[in-house]
Each structure stands twice: as C-alpha cells, then as structure tokens.
Image: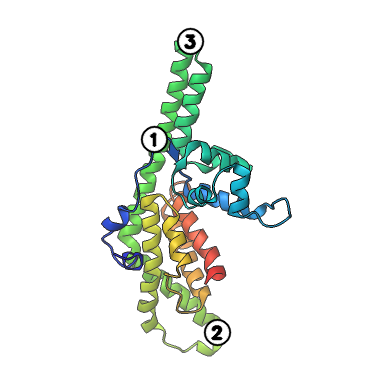
Amino acid sequence: MSFSVLLNNDNHTDLLSMNKKRNRDSVSASPEGIMRLKQARASQRDDEGKPLSYERLAVKAKMTDRTVKRFFRGIAVDRNNAIAIIKALGLRPEDVLYPEEFLVSESIEQIQAKDTGDSERTGELIKGLERALSEFKKSEEASLEVMEWLKANRKALSQEAAEAALRKHYDQNRNNVDTDYSGDIEVFSQEIRKYLQLIYYCLELGSWELMDRAIQEFLMPVNRDLQLYVDALNFIKNQKVSLSFAPEEANELTLYLDYLIKIIPIRF
C-alpha cells in the first residue's frame, strides 16, 4: 500500500508496521524535541557563516549525516550519537529525548556514579525514578486520551473548521457577501480531515517522519487559498483542542498543529 493511500485509509495496520523496533541502546527525539532540534539548527551558522547543514552538523558531532538526518526525523539512533547531536546544537538531552528514555538513562547513570555501597542512597534514587516514571505514565495516558478524541471527532472537527475558515474568508471579501459557499464546506472538510489523519498517525507512531514525508512529497491537499488551511487548523487548535484539554495534555497535538500552521504557507 502506498503512502498516499495510507493517508486516505482509516485502517492503519500497514502504516504501523513501518515503525521498527528500537534497539536497546537507541533513543529517539520526541515531537517537541524535534521541533527544538530544527529551531537550534536553523539559528546556527557554520565556520563560514552559512546556515548549518546536516552535513556540517554531522562533522561537528563526528558521525555520518545519514545518522543526523534519521535523528531529526524521529528515528531511533544510537544513544551516544543522539547525545552528541544534541550537545553539538547546545541543547540538553532532557529537552530533546522522550521523557522515559531520558529518565531511565539519567537515573541509571546517577546510581552507578554514586553507588558507594550505600543501599539507602541507591534506594532514594530508585524511588525518585519511580516517581518520575509515574508522572510520565499519567502524561502518556493523557496523550492516548487526546488521540482517541481526535480519532472519534475527526469528521466533526473537519466540518466545523472548514465552515469557520470559509465563513471568515467570505466575510472578509465584500464582493462575496451573498455567495453561497455551503456546497464547498463538505469538499474542504474532506481535505482538512486528511491533515488530521496525518497528525493522528504521527501521534500513534510518536514520530515526525510521516509528517516530513507528506510535506516533502507534496501529498497533502492544497487546492485553494493557503490561508484557508491555516485558518481551519487554527480553529481546531484554539476553539476545540484548547477548550477540551489542559495545555500539558494536548502538548504533542498542539505541536503538530503549530508545525502545519507555520509550514503550509512556506512549503506549498
């Protein structure tokens, strides 16, 4: 099944099979971490004053550019390579890696570094890890709730967003005050639904790879004024997501929406 077909298919078994098992010693960047990686790379320059390319970053981090590109796409890489990339950009592991991966790695290192035979101290460190992982579990459960909400309400969200964006567009254009755009709502809502479908898959896989592929291969619908897509996604973010969940609960969903809102006017 082709990637473009998957975006139009609610049966995502084939898509999930694309998500390979991680190596025990590999880690990947979280969606928020990928955003920070991209922002850090965009803000830096190489020795010649040019934008920092993946190739230059690879030299700086002492690895292949293929590894760097994989990490930026949310694919798991060797832990040491991941840390090298993060440090080369002046970031911290806890700002980029998935919380549970960072916590486990950091806690084990602390236990090993401070293990002087003091079982009480070791016990305190382990309890700290358990508390942190418990908090992460709550966050993960909230994320799953957001995913199920998006899946169950995708059609209604798309319909309302399409109507709101089209109404705003026609209201701003005085020449179209009396225009009946009701017939266009259904068509536009189907296009918005594909964007939400993509976000859902990204949330489920915990990876930006699908998002990048869809954008790079121009697989997302852009059949009208780009501002309409931006307005529709903004409506979902501000009028639906923010009113349905606390900010920390819908953090990843908001990040994906923000990314699309910013990238659509640039890439299409």
Asked whether the viewer can see residue 11, the reply is yes
Q: Is residue 115 above or below residue 131?
A: above
Near-viewer residue (247 or 187): 187
Near-viewer residue (253 or 181): 253
Which disc is residue 78 wearing? Answer: none
CB atoms of marks 1 and 3 within 8 Å: no
Label 3: state its secondary structure.
loop
Give the total number of marks visible in the rendering.
3
Q: Which residue is mark 3?
A: 118
Q: Residues within 10 Å of mark 2 (few under 14, many from 20)?
A: few
Q: Earlier in the sequence, mark 1 or mark 3?
A: 1
Q: Which residue is mark 1?
A: 24
Q: Which residue is mark 2?
A: 173
CB atoms of marks 1 and 2 within 8 Å: no
Circle 2: residue type: Asn
Q: Residues within 10 Å of mark 3 (few under 14, many from 20)?
A: few
In the rendering, at what x and y percent does residue 160 appear?
Answer: 39, 70
Q: Earlier in the sequence, mark 1 or mark 2?
A: 1
